[in-house]
Amino acid sequence: MLSIKGYSRAQASRFCLRKYYLHIISDCTVHSDERGAMLPDLADAHLYAVSLIWHCMRYDTEEQDWRGWRVEIADDTGRTLVVVPFTTVPSEAFGRRHTSG
């Protein structure tokens, strides 16, 4: 097995971070992530996006309709890699009932 300075490949991969930008977007609004987040891989970026969505919905005092909102995960070239809709996280997770109509 390949090792780098006594670390296994799995351990070494933790130190290879990439910058991902997580833009929060709706049909009318764009909140651009200018700083980005250093994360090991796209799977971790997706988990980070879900966490952002969870926090936005959890602390929403106006109970906004989140349909149409999304987090776009982009790389350092600006290319969108993954789109995570806010509807990925059910509103029931926050003790709210989604009413239609």
Image (spheres, rainbow, N blue to C red):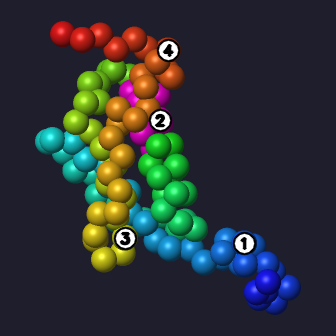
Residue bearing the label numbered 1: 10
Which disc number belongs to residue 75? 3
Q: Is residue 59 visible?
A: no
Identify the element where label 1 is drawn.
helix
First-in-chain label (2 vs 4) = 2
Nearest the eye: 31 or 74 = 74
Dot label at residue 54: 2
Mark 1–mark 2 Cα distance, whole angstroms, equals: 29 Å
Q: Earlier in the sequence, mark 1 or mark 3?
A: 1
Tell me which amino acid carries mark 3: Asp
Where disc 4 sits, the SS reads loop
Please report contact status of discs 3 and 4: CB closer than 8 Å, yes or no.
no
The answer to whether residue 65 is left or right of residue 9 is: left
Residue at 24%, 11% (x, y): give it: 100
Q: Residue furthest bottom?
A: 5
Q: Determine whether 54 is above or below 39 in the image.
A: above
Q: Secondary structure at mark 3?
A: loop
Question: Three-letter amino acid code at disc 4?
Answer: Gly
Q: Residue at x 33, y 20 (%)?
A: 63
User: Where does label 4 land, which residue?
Assistant: 95
